[in-house]
Image (cartoon, rainbow, N blue to C red):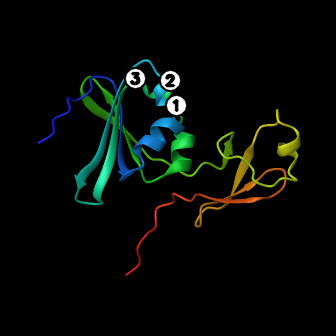
């Protein structure tokens, strides 16, 4: 049995799709934080079969919930204070993401004007489709969880 100690103050990202924790670690820039981070890969899960978990001993303010919601809004965020879960944060798809996705359209103004922010607006919440604010280029998250329909 693998034993990883609890954290006194920080947050735990739970129910991460198995194998996605390292990408999330980099996307959230957790490597830039000066705090303890534990990544647990392929933990057993009744709900998911296998899952990844990230434990971070840092204040929750260090976490960009919009980026996390964009990556996978099914992740559970547990806020820890004094060795206890004091809050569970619900993630939602952000209405807009800034400088997370890069527009692939070579004719888009963001390809020419490098200093322009890459802004994508949520166009279809059900299908998780975003569109470039400037040229309407479509973006669908390739890592989106596939919900199996029986």
- What element does badge 2 sit on? helix
Q: Nearer the viewer, mark 1 or mark 3?
A: 1
Give the image location of residue 72, x and y in percent. Answer: 49, 52
Which residue has dot 1 on it? Answer: 29
The answer to whether 46 is drawn above or below residue 118 in the figure is: below
Q: 1 or 126, which lies in front?
A: 1
Q: Residues within 10 Å of mark 1 (few under 14, many from 20)?
A: few
For residue 58, the mark is: 3
For residue 32, the mark is: 2
**Residue at (48%, 43%) from the top-left corner?**
23
Question: Spatial distance from mark 2 to mark 3, Cα to Cα?
Answer: 12 Å
Residue 66, quarter of picture: top right
Question: Spatial distance from mark 1 to mark 2, Cα to Cα?
Answer: 6 Å
Question: Which image quadrant: the C terminus?
Answer: bottom left
**Residue at (11%, 42%) from the top-left corner?**
1
Q: Of callouts 2 and 3, which one flags the residue occurring earlier in the amino acid sequence?
A: 2
Q: Residues within 10 Å of mark 2 (few under 14, many from 20)?
A: few
Give the image location of residue 124, x and y in percent. Answer: 65, 64
- How many marks the image carries: the answer is 3
User: Is mark 1 in CB contact (under 8 Å) with mark 2?
Assistant: yes
User: Is mark 1 in CB contact (under 8 Å) with mark 3?
Assistant: no
């Amino acid at each position: 049995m693998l034993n990883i100690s609890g954290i006194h103050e920080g947050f735990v990202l739970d129910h991460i799709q198995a194998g996605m924790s390292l990408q999330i670690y980099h996307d959230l820039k957790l490597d830039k934080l000066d705090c303890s981070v534990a990544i647990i890969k392929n933990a057993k899960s009744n709900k998911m079969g296998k899952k990844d978990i990230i434990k971070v001993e840092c204040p929750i303010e260090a976490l960009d919930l919009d980026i996390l919601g964009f990556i996978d809004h099914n992740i559970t965020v547990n806020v820890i204070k004094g060795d206890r879960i004091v809050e569970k944060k619900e993630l939602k798809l952000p209405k807009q993401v800034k400088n997370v996705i890069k527009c692939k359209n070579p004719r888009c103004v963001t390809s020419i004007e490098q200093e322009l922010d890459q802004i994508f607006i949520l166009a279809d919440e059900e299908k998780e489709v975003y569109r470039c604010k400037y040229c309407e280029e479509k973006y669908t998250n390739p890592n989106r969880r596939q919900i199996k329909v029986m």
